[in-house]
Amino acid sequence: MEEFIKEWGYIALFLYSFGGGFVGLVVAGVLSFAGDLNLYISIMVAITANFLGDQFLFFIARGNKAYAKGMMKNYGRKIALAHIMMRKYGSFVVFIQKYIYGIKTLIPLAMGLTKYSYFKFSVLNIFASIIWGLIVGFASFKAGEYILSTADDFKYVGLGIVVVVILGISYVFKRIDKKKN
């Protein structure tokens, strides 16, 4: 398993971070604490992928507005929240969106649909990605000892509990989504 992680860990981290997820970087930070990955390489991979993913979303929205609007039509409330955040926080929303699950992929799309400067978005996005990568990467590395000791304590029982909790939460959110529609 360690060889598999060493060979494919950075690629998996890149793909996960490209989509805007931070859990991959948390796992990489913990694996870096365990000695399976290099923390600095993990942070650089996550920063690069996160930056490129947001640039890709912004570019898609800017280049093909109809396609972006079609992608976003299923997320009406989240789009409204994204627009409120853009009005309230202005350019700082590029930094904030990195940490908010559910809208972190919608903000670049929404900004791409506006007349927001591509250059300004790129500059802010690179700084936001760097700050995001450093905070999440180093925090997960520091929490690595606690996470690994907790995981070791609940190795088998915890896995079952986690699966049941995830399935339960997924069921609840699907029911809520069906009621809204």
Image: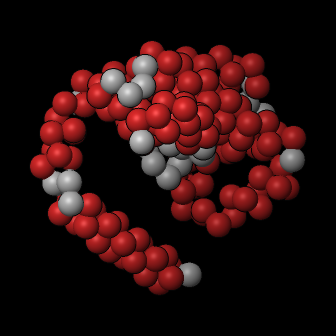
Which image quadrant is residue 87 in? Answer: top right
Quadrant housing the C terminus: bottom right
Name the side, left or right, on which 47 lies relative to 22.
right
Is 49 located above or below residue 175 in the figure? above
Residue 44 percent across, percent down from the top left: 53, 19
The number of numbered discs placed on residues in the rendered structure image is 0
Does residue 154 show up? yes
Which image quadrant is residue 116 in? Answer: top right
State the residue in front, 25 or 70: 25
Residue 160 percent across, percent down from the top left: 25, 67
Name the side, left or right, on which 160 lies relative to 136.
left
Does residue 135 show up? no
State the residue in front, 78 or 174: 174
Q: Residue at x 60, y 54 (%)?
A: 79
State the residue in front, 108 or 37: 37
Q: Pick out the residue farthest to the left.
A: 153
Q: Residue at x 19, y 30 (%)?
A: 145
Quadrant housing the N terminus: top left
Which image quadrant is residue 29 in? Answer: top left
State the residue in front, 42 or 103: 42
Residue 140 percent across, percent down from the top left: 31, 30
Name the side, left or right, on which 148 lies relative to 20.
left
The image's colouring method is secondary structure
Q: Residue at x 46, y 77 (%)?
A: 174
Is 40 located above or below residue 167 in the figure? above
Q: Residue at x 69, y 44 (%)?
A: 109
Residue 93 percent across, percent down from the top left: 52, 33
